[in-house]
Amino acid sequence: MHVEATADRGLSARQLGFCRAGRPVFDGIDFAVGPGELLQVTGANGSGKTSLLRVLSGLLEPAAGELRWRARPVRAGEAGYQQSVAYVGHSDGIDPDLSAAQNLAFAMQIAGAAPSRALVDRALGAYGLAPAMPVPVRRLSQGQRRRVALARLGLVPRVLWLLDEPLTSLDEQAGDAFQAQLHTHLRAGGMAVVATHCALPAGGRFLHLGA
């Protein structure tokens, strides 16, 4: 697929830059991700991987360059873009006072879908979380919380996944569940930008930050 066609159908950045406290974190970032494609963002700690994902998600404003979604410039808070994005950062974004099952049901509800016990059970079961379904999230381990956040991806369909170190705190079985989930997402025409220390077997292109 030509770069221009990919950019027109997905997410693209041109000379994207970001500063913190007046100091550049990254600059000159160029990429394009289209349907069915994965971009793996690599680099040492402090190289700007998390900041880049937060810029792509709309949580931070870029200092330079342009971000486009389906050939249109992305504006802060733009509803059409936000409704296309699923962002999983370091904090997982789940309510510690709700159970794992309640978190997923609530996510479906605010996305406009009717909560389904069968779908919630299936999503959590794929990550080996069936015993933890009724337990308040605050009582779960960090790895279990991560699995809840990743299980949510399959219940609130978003075409663009922005994932920050999704394999952190996951055991081998949960890691395999995520790889299968990502593979299904990409085969269905979804896109993903994933910050990672370890290359994912799903392949795709790589963007390395830092020297």
Image (tube, rainbow, N blue to C red):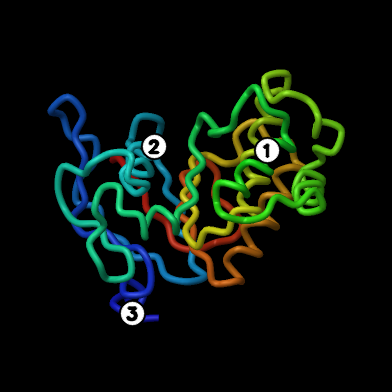
The residue depicted at 32 percent of the width and 64 percent of the height is 69
Tell me which residue sits at (31%, 61%) in the image.
31
- Please tell me which of labels 2 and 3 falls first in the chain: 3
Instruction: Pick whichever of labels 1 and 2 is earlier in the sequence.
Output: 2
- Which amino acid type is marked by label 3? Ala
Residue 50 has which mark? Answer: 2
User: Which element type, helix, strand or loop, lies under badge 2?
Assistant: helix
Residue at mark 2 to residue at mark 3: CA–CA distance: 27 Å
* 130 to 40, vertically: above or below: above
The reply to whether the C-beta atoms of the residues labelled 1 and 2 are less than 8 Å apart is: no
Q: Quadrant of the N terminus?
A: bottom left
Q: Residue at x 21, y 59 (%)?
A: 14
Quadrant hosting residue 33? bottom left
Secondary structure state at the residue bearing disc 3: helix
Judging by the rendered image, the residue that carries numbered circle 3 is 5
Residue 64, percent across and down? 14, 47
Query: Which of the two marks, 1 or 3, is nearer to us in this view?
Result: 1
Question: Callout 1: 10 Å neighbours few (<14), some, many (20+)?
Answer: many
What is the three-letter code of the residue carrying label 1?
A: Val
CA–CA distance in space, label 1 to label 3: 35 Å
Instruction: Work out whether 163 lies above or below 102.
Output: below
**Mark 3 Cα shell of 10 Å, populated few (<14), some (14-19), many (≥20):** some
Q: Are marks 2 and 3 in contact (CB under 8 Å)?
A: no
